[in-house]
Image: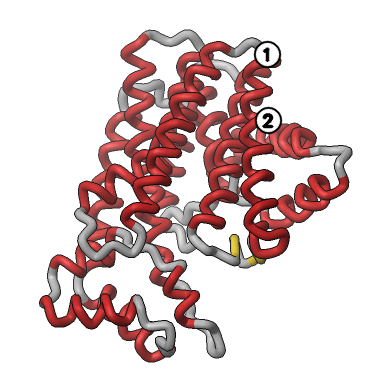
Amino acid sequence: MLILTLEKINFIIKNEIEIFETLFRNNFYSKIPLIQEINNYFFKIKGKYIRPIFVFLITKMLGNISKKTYDLAILIELIHTASLIHDDVIDFSNTRRGFLSINAIWQNKTAVIFGDYIFSKSLNIAIKNNYIDYLNLISKTIEQMSEGEILQMKYFNNFFIKEYIYNIIIFKKTAILISACCEGCAKSLNKKKKIVLNIKKFGELAGMAFQIKDDLLDYKNHINDNENYFLLLREFKITLPFIYALKKTSKKYKNWLFNEFNNKNINKYSLIKILNFIKNSGGIEYSIYKIKLFTNKALLLLNNYPNNKANKSLKYLILFNKERLL
């Protein structure tokens, strides 16, 4: 059995990722002490760089990596970073990847402005290099992501949310940015419209699979003793596992769940009961099924492209998402 890790997947772009990390960090440098303090903290909690990995693998599959490829990877990761900082403010989240979030340390106002500051850096890269194609791409992408965030705010902890609304939210919030990675790569290589559209679709499918997996992993988090369980529940988003479970339960149980979500004195037992309800109502299995569905569709699209090492690594990246535990 093949055991997939990001290190194995990234092997053919190891040098590119190392160069990217240096360039990305340089983009954060500021002479303003507070900004640099936040920058230094941010790099302690850096992510997996999934979007830059998509950029480098797609470009290698279709052609050759250039300075424009690195610039695309940087501006996409800047947009992603800014959106996460804003998400933590909106979602009342005090942690990010096991560390205190930026808003938890420097307060919401500073976090929002810092997120805007990072957004501006992505635009600056496109303007400074006269990347009109990237400007068009990222302006449309940020617009869609903002719409997704507003939709999520509207339906946050809404027991009446339908699956199709959830799909729209995760498409606009997550899939659209991975799709932009893929579209930007194809356009930067001057590929034909059909190739651009197909690789964009691949990004959309991959993005949907990645977000559902993230939502699924939320239910695997451990609940610690002595936590404020009401605040923990406030961070809890009604995502696909819960949406499916709600469809399968009685009105009486729905009322109990609704009351618990608004109970400021909720205890650990009730919170565990809510999580067990989701796990035992088929929501987990249904979410796994949807991940497989989007994964298989994405893999099929890759069969239309050169069967080179980058293509194989992309396939492994999609399969890695299906199995990952973080």
Q: Nearer the viewer, mark 1 or mark 2?
A: 2
x and y, in percent, of residue 137 in the image: 48, 21
Question: Looking at this view, is 149 or 195 the one in front?
Answer: 149
Is residue 283 found left or right of 89 in the rendered image? left
Q: Name the residue tied to disc 2.
A: 121
Give the total number of marks visible in the rendering.
Answer: 2
- Label 1 to label 2: alpha-carbon separation: 12 Å
* Label 2 Cα crowd, 10 Å radius (few <14 / some 14-19 / many 20+): some
Q: Which mark is residue 245?
A: none
Residue 241: x, y in percent? 28, 64
Q: Position of residue 140 (x, y in %)?
A: 44, 25
Of all residues, the one furthest to the front in this rendering is 109
In what element is the residue under mark 1? loop
Report whether 175 appears left or right of 83.
left
Which residue is rendered at x = 14% and y = 74% of the image?
Answer: 249
Going by the numbered disc 2, the residue's amino acid type is Lys
In primary-sequence order, the first of circles 1 and 2 is 2
Res 80 quadrant in image: top right
Residue drawn at 43 percent across, 10 percent down = 191
Name the residue carrying label 1: 129
* Residue 305 versus residue 215 in the image, above or below: above
Q: In the visual, does 24 lie left or right of 280?
A: right
Q: Amino acid at mark 1?
A: Asn
